[in-house]
Amino acid sequence: MSDVQSINKLPAGWQCIKLGDVGEVGSGVTLGRALRRSVTRSVPYLRVANVKDGQLDLSYVKDIEATESEIDKCRLEPGDLLLTEGGDPDKLGRGTVWKGELPECIHQNHIFRVRFPKDKFSPEFLSGLMSSEYGKAYFLAHAKQTTGIASINQKVLKAFPLLVPSLPEQKRIAALLSKHMAVVEKARAAAEERLKAAKELPLAYLRQVFENEDARGWPKKKIGDFAKVQSGYAFKSEWFAKSGIRLLRNANVSQGCLDWNDAVYLPEDRRTEFASYELTEGDIVLSLDRPWVSNGLKVSRLSDSDLPCLLLQRVGRFCVNDNIDRDYLYTFLNSPSFIDEITEHDQSLGVPHVSPKQVEGISIPVPSRARQLEVAREMMRRKTTAERLVVIHEEELTAINSLPAALLRMAYSGDM
């Protein structure tokens, strides 16, 4: 029942009622208004930030000064349905039920409070209805939308067509939904843990390799003994063209791959001027500005599909000599040991920044050539395994995330 127009096919014993005909819609207190008045007292104040995706986050509820009349008008009672008036269009209409979590609490003016007769309606049932595809379709069809934000007003909310069976049936469906949703949340948490563990497999191996007793006995040298870090050319933006040879920038260097979605080009006829900056297959590149981000270290290797391209300023290429295995060096660059070293360098103008000399000065353990090859091969094997597991667990999580909508669809179609 994803379309609002489908209400002409109600399950047997159900009825359609406008929310405003049976529910009292209340607005909250405007923050700061009571401060200009006398005879106020402090009271917990529920804000939009406390109502998230159908859940309440009461970890940081603040108090405000309000008058007794404002407190009486906006005091929350167990069973009140709470909905935010605006936000992400995909989340519009997602509300929650106030269960008396605090002895006394009032709400912000950007939160609608809907109070229903408890002898006729289950707030949990109605909250689920508004969060369903049916409710979402209604709110999106009637919301006022600006860039990335959708909002509803009291008129739209009061006109919401409630689809309701008898109160015992509402309670039965709400209890079943709660039971099934708890199972879904448990499955989601477990799947997220499996996904996290799969993503961390390569890093766990690198810790095992470079932080064990055996590795402590390996000779240590400087990266600069085996590779010079070449910084890219400062191509002028006025030289950029709509096509030609791509320029490898910081924005293109990701974790283990290059991202060319945002590419800039130099005219092809100027390519030969910068032959010393042309990259080749297998080259290792590192972002020198903000090398570490939340997703990990911005280091990668070039494949044939990345070519041709030229090295731009603030990206470094490792020009590796024959005294170290290139794959082993790349493996070490992804290790916690290298990441810890590179993130300790000073910041320049507030932006994490490393120089080629600083990178070359970082120590690297150098085992025998045979051990280097063994480490690199095992790292590649584990990375391949991890990538396969990540795909499996992402698909699993996608399937789990689709279950709440399916459950809601069943519940409000009379099939639960």
Image: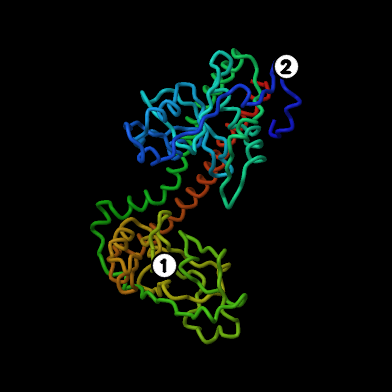
Looking at the picture, tell me which residue is in the foreground, 135 or 401. 135
Q: Residue at x 59, y 19 (%)?
A: 173
Closer to us: 237 or 292: 237
Residue that badge 2 annotates: 12
Q: Amino acid at mark 1?
A: Leu
Q: SS at mark 1?
A: strand
Distance between the alpha carbons at the discs numbered 2 and 1: 65 Å
x, y percent for residue 368: 32, 63
Question: In the image as oriented, which residue stretches furthest toward the front?
Answer: 38
Quadrant hosting residue 322: bottom left
Q: Amino acid at mark 2?
A: Ala
Residue at the extreme right of the image, as rendered: 8
Quick check: 182 above or below 371? above
Q: Position of residue 45 (x, y in %)?
A: 39, 34
| Quarter of the figure with the N terminus | top right
Q: Circle 2 — which element?
A: loop
Instruction: Name the image quarter holding the C terminus.
Output: top right
Frontmost residue, 368 versus 184: 184
Residue located 33% across and 53% down the image: 209
Q: Quadrant of residue 241?
A: bottom right
Mark toward the viewer: 2 or 1: 2
Residue at the limit of the structure toward the bottom, as seen here: 273
Location of residue 321 in the rendering, given as x and y in whole percent from the top left corner:
38, 75
Pointer 1: what residue? Answer: 286
Residue 197 horizontal/vertical position (percent): 42, 43
**With 130 as the anchor, is 324 left or right in this view?**
left
